[in-house]
Image (cartoon, helix red, strand yellow):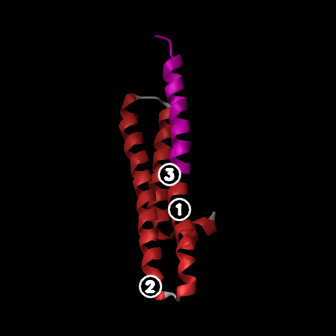
């Protein structure tokens, strides 16, 4: 996990922070499903995905920019940078998937509640 953070770069920090907040909001909703928690879950989930995508894009920019600094036989190195940059998006997807799972428990509790 620490290696993933190192490879992903600075974009991993906001992605992780907002993802953990989204997960906390989803767990809170699962424990006490109230309508007021839904917008918070949606915005934090979207923010997590946007931060993951931003980390990916900035990593790709760095990787492609560095191609001019290496010799011609090392130009394929951008593929390694792309792989490292994808860690941001992978973390965002993992955290949003966990938050969605927790949120679905709250939705199930609402669906099973007696009317």
For label 3, the SS is helix
Q: CA distance from mark 3 to mark 1?
A: 19 Å
Q: CA distance from mark 1 to mark 2?
A: 21 Å
Residue 111: horizontal and vertical position, in percent?
50, 19
Quadrant in which the N terminus is drawn: bottom right
Identify the residue under disc 3: 20
Residue 53 included in the magenta stretch of the image: no
Q: Is residue 61 above or below residue 12?
A: below
Q: Nearer the viewer, mark 1 or mark 2?
A: 2
Residue shown at the point (49%, 63%) measured from the top left: 12
Identify the residue under disc 1: 86
Q: Which residues are magenta?
A: 92-115
Q: Earlier in the sequence, mark 3 or mark 1?
A: 3
Q: CA distance from mark 2 to mark 3?
A: 37 Å
Asked where in the image residue 2 lies, by quadrant, the reply is: bottom right
Identify the residue under disc 2: 68
Residue 110 included in the magenta stretch of the image: yes
Residue 6: horizontal and vertical position, in percent?
57, 71
Q: Earlier in the sequence, mark 1 or mark 2?
A: 2
Callout 2 environment at 10 Å: few (<14), some (14 to 19), or many (20+)? Answer: few
Callout 1 environment at 10 Å: few (<14), some (14 to 19), or many (20+)? Answer: many
Question: Which residue is nearer to you in this view: 74 or 113?
Answer: 74
């Amino acid at each position: 996990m620490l290696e993933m953070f190192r490879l992903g770069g600075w974009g991993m920090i906001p992605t992780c922070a907002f993802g953990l907040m989204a997960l906390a909001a989803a767990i809170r909703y699962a424990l006490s499903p109230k309508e007021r928690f839904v917008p918070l879950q949606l915005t934090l989930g979207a923010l997590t995905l946007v931060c993951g995508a931003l980390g990916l894009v900035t990593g790709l920019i760095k990787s492609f920019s560095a191609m001019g600094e290496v010799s011609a036989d090392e130009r394929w190195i951008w593929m390694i940078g792309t792989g490292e940059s994808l860690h941001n998006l992978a973390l965002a997807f993992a955290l949003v998937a966990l938050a969605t799972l927790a949120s679905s428990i709250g939705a199930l509790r609402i669906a099973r509640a007696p009317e």
